Amino acid sequence: MILFEIYPHLLTITTQYQQVIHKPVIVNGQNKQPIVLQMAKNAKPNPAQKNASTSQPGEISDDSQLHLLKRQLFNQINPIWSDRKNLTQDLVYRVAVATNGNIIAYQPLDKTANRQVTKTPLPAFVSQTSTIPGSVHQTFASFRVVFRKSGVLEISPWWGFSKRPDVVGDKITESRILNRLQRQLTANLKQYWNGKTSSKQDLKYRVAVNKNGIITDYEPINQVAYDHFRDTPLPFMFQELHGSNVAITNEKQPLAHFRVVFKRNGLLEITPWKLYLFR
């Protein structure tokens, strides 16, 4: 199984909008002409535009780094998005994220998204809308953020993934240690999970633990896992351990990664993640 099969919603970059980019004039290394985005309904992104995006100074194109920052962005926005029930249509934005995970700019993609931006958490991070990437003067990653009227948050790289992203950081690979940590993780999760979920499908996650068995990161790997994450003990356990639900980005120690499935029949299934991502 490859990541593209696990993340089908992340690879759907066809939208109702097309980004028409007017390249800036570069004089002495500085942009002298702003980049303007125009939207056209029912138009598909032009694959050639990805090459145009990577030519923009400072825009991140590394898939693994994009994958990490995407999770950081989701973990910042999703917990504080409270006005989920009053949307009459999907609201779509382009959002720029700095290398440390901070949101530094956002741009509505139509008039409705601009008018109803206060129904999203974006103004809590940035005071006003901006033109991206023309207004961003530092290294950044660009994402398409969709606040669905169904109450679901969807985030994907603005230009999609060019290849399968890998898990960032050093990894624990010794079988003896992995087996111990797998047993420890299983016991910890069973202690807090009541075996119930409102989902009609299994909830699948990647969970990382350090050498002491402490959960340092977790990530949904199918859409229902995003939608029903509160049915699992992961947010509670992570909050208790770290005081926040934002993944730790400066984790320097090697981690063991596992695929954790909260099955709809109440069973818990945990296997080493290397079967899916490690080569």
Image (tube, rainbow, N blue to C red):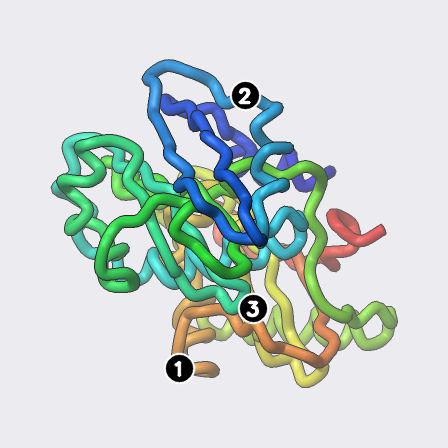
Please name whichever residue, 260 or 80, is drawn nearer the observer in this view of the structure.
Answer: 80
Q: Which residue is mark 1?
A: 243
Quadrant of the image occupied by residue 172: bottom right
Quadrant of the image occupied by residue 243: bottom left
User: Mark 3 is on which residue type?
Assistant: Asp
Establish if 21 lies above or below 184.
above
Q: Is residue 193 visible?
A: no
Establish if 10 lies above or below 60.
above
Q: Are marks 3 and 2 in contact (CB under 8 Å)?
A: no
User: Mark 2 is on which residue type?
Assistant: Asn
Residue that appears at 51% across and 69% down: 100
Q: What is the CA distance from the residue labelled 1 to the residue labelled 2? A: 42 Å
Q: Which residue is mark 2?
A: 46
Residue that appears at 39% across and 60% down: 103
Residue that appears at 34% across and 19% down: 40
Establish if 24 lies above or below 215.
above
Q: What is the CA distance from the residue labelled 1 to the residue labelled 3? A: 13 Å
Q: Which residue is mark 3?
A: 217
Q: Earlier in the sequence, mark 1 or mark 3?
A: 3
The quadrant of the rendering that contains the N terminus is: top right
Establish if 171 lies above or below 205.
below
